[in-house]
Image: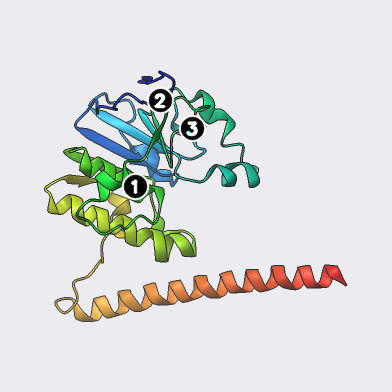
Amino acid sequence: MRMFSIRGGGRRMKPVKKIAAKVAILGTDISWKKAPLDDNTWEVWGMNSFWDMWGKYATRWFEIHPVSTMVDEGWNRYSWLTECPIPVYMIKHYKDIPNSIPYPLADVSKGFLKQFSSTFSYEMALAIHEGFKTIGIYGIALSLGTLRERFIELQGLLYWIGVAQGRGIEIQFPEYDEDNYKHKYLYGLDYWNEVKYSKNKILSAINSVLVYRYCIDGVNWKKRYLKK
């Protein structure tokens, strides 16, 4: 277990220094288990309310949500943060969360598009800003997730992956996650395979929208029915 603290009180937080040249960014899909969790040559970054999954391995944490969502939605995500033993990046520093650090958005985003559509985007951008040589992506399958994950959050993540590769940073992920991050066929060169592949992806997206709409209509219908 690799944990360190920056407890010091007040608003002046000690700078966080990276303790390895490689960082693993974790999501909750099954491939997170392939991450190098016990390898001291890697930092491990976790997020949100998943401390029970990765907390004992994590070197930094990310909770980029308004406090009101943690309380109003009843997720009990705020109380444990007051005792979080490692640096936790948040919208701002909170006095009752000693290890909270305001996410350095101005510094991280300078010179780039502000493509921050998920916590993963913030993590990727910070890893690039701090000069990690390798970024591992484990358990992040946005292309198979909710409509928001597929159409909004994935765009931001892919943008920062492109920025990282453009800077010569190595991107690693489990082999079976590869299709989550690349277009399987080359447009033009693999024309008919690409057309078929793209049509299937579009149909899958349309199906997801229809299912989502059906569920929403069902909920709305139930609400209307119960009011009668």
Instruction: Tell me: residue 189, above or below residue 137.
Output: below
Q: Residue at left 48%, top 65%?
A: 147
Distance from disc 3 to disc 1, alpha carbons, whole Å, reads 19 Å
Label 2 or label 1, whichever comes before in sequence order: 2
x, y percentage for residue 141? 39, 54
Image position of 120 (left or right of 208): left
Q: Residue under circle 3?
A: 94
Label 3 or label 1, whichever comes before in sequence order: 3
Q: Residue under circle 2?
A: 86
Label 2 or label 3, whichever comes before in sequence order: 2
Image position of 46 (left or right of 224): left
- Badges 3 and 1: C-beta atoms under 8 Å apart? no
Residue 173 makes an appearance in the image: no
Residue 199 falls in which quadrant of the image? bottom left
**Kind of element beneath mark 3:** loop
x, y percentage for residue 221? 74, 73
Q: Quadrant of the N terminus?
A: top left
Residue 101 makes an appearance in the image: yes
x, y percentage for residue 11? 41, 27
Distance from disc 2 to disc 3, alpha carbons, whole Å, reads 14 Å
